[in-house]
Amino acid sequence: MLAGTVLGSLPVAYLSTWGPRTGTGQLPLARLPFGGGVVLPGLVQWLGSIAWDALVGLFGGEALAELTGLPFWAAVLIVLVLQCALGVFGYALIHRVQAVMSVLLVLAFAALAVKVLSGHPVATADTATGGDHTGAVVLFSTIALSLAISWAPYASDFSRYLPADTSSRGVFWFTLLGLTASYAIGEGLGLALGTSLGDQTATGVATLLGGGFLGSLALAVIALAAVSSNAMNDYSGSLALQTVGVRLRRPVSAVVVTVLAFALILWMHSGELASKFQNVLLFVSYWIPPFLGVVLPDWLRRTRGGRRVDARAATTTRPWAAVVAFVAGFGAAVPFMNTSLYTGPVAAALHGADLAYYVGFVVSLAAYFLLRGRRPVDLD
C-alpha cells in the first residue's frame, strides 16, 4: 500500500514544480508535446473529472442523507450543486476553503483513529497464499497507486499561481509528503478496520464512532470534504475543456459535469458498490501513465541545461508522435488490466496482479523516444 502510494505521488510532486516555472495549468502544458492532439488526453481528463465527482460525491451524499434524513438522491444533488458553485468561483475561493478543510480533516481523522483503534480489533489475517497472495498484493498496491497518481493531470493547476522564484525542491517535497501522508493514513485506517467496518459507507463510519455527536460530526465532515474536493475536479475539468477548444463558460461546464456525475452516482449506488467503485477508480486513471510517458521526456528535453519554457510561445514538432505513443501505451496496458468488468489475459495468468499502470508508462515512454527521435525542440 505504502509503496503504491509513494510511486503514485512521485509524478504528481514533480509535475507540481512546473506550475511556478510556467504559470500554466497541466493540460495546457500538454500542448507542448501533443500540439493539436491534446484533444485526446484533454477529453479523457474531462471525463475523468466527472468520474471523480461521482466517486467522491457518492459518499458525500450518503453522509448528508444520513445526517439530515433527506432522500439519497436529494442529498447527492445538494452536494453536487454546492461543489458546482464553489468550482465556478475558481481557484482563489477553492484555495481558501481547502485551507479550512485541511484542518478539519486532520482533526476528524485524528479522532477517528483514536476512537476506532482503541476499541476495535485490527485486521491482520491473511487469507491468500502462494501466487494468489502475490497477485493480491500487487493489485492492492496498484489501487493505492491509482489514487495518488490521479492528481497528476491536475498538478500544476494548483501550483501555477505560486511566485516564479518558488523553490522547486520545496514544491516537490511538500507535495510528495502531503499526498503520501494523507493517503497512507486514510488507507492504513481502512486496512486496520477491514474486519470491523462491515458497512463500508458514511453511515458505517458514523456507527463505528458510536453515533451521537461524534458520529454526526464525522458525517458533516465527510459531506463538506466531498464538496471541497470535487470543486477541484470541476475547476480542472473546465481547464481541460478549454484546452481542447470547447468554449463553454465555466458555469455551463459545471452544470454539465453535475448532471453527468449525478447519473453516475445513482448507477454506482444501485448495487455492488464496492465492485463498481473499484472499477471506476481503476478505469479513470489507466490513461495517466501513458500520458506521463509523453509529457515527462518532452519537458526534460525542453528544460535541459536549466532553460526556461514559455508555454505560450514554445513550438511543437512531431505532435503525432505524442498521440501515437499515448495510444500505444494504453493499448499495451489492456492485457494487464484487472477489474471485475474486464480481466486481461496477462493479469489472469498472474493471479490477478494488475501491472497495467507500469506497462502503459514504459511502452508510451519507449514509443515516444523512438518516434520523436533526437530532433531538437525549438526553444526561446
Image (cartoon, grey):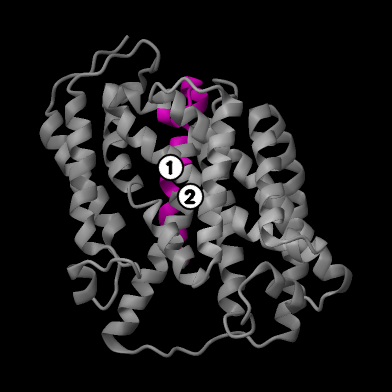
SS category of the residue bearing label 1: helix
Left of 196 or right of it: where is 184? left
The three-letter amino acid code for the residue at tag 1 is Leu
Residue 273 image offset from top left, x and y in percent? 52, 69
Report the predominant secondary structure element of the magenta stretch: helix
Residue 264 image offset from top left, x and y in percent? 51, 54
Does the CB distance between marks 1 and 2 fall below 8 Å?
yes
Q: Quadrant of residue 349?
A: bottom left
SS category of the residue bearing label 2: helix
Q: Where is mark 2, residue-wise?
A: 51
Residue bounds of the magenta highlight: 2-27
The three-letter amino acid code for the residue at tag 2 is Ala
Left of 377 or right of it: where is 380? right
Give the answer, above or below, for where 267 lies relative to 208.
above
Quadrant, the C terminus: top left
Q: Quadrant of residue 90?
A: top right
The structure residue drawn at horizontal position 20% and vertical position 19%, both measured from the top left corner, is 317
Magenta stretch: includes residue 26: yes
The structure residue drawn at horizontal position 53% and vertical position 51%, both measured from the top left corner, is 263
Q: Is residue 181 visible?
A: no
Magenta stretch: includes residue 118: no
Residue 47, which numbered label? 1
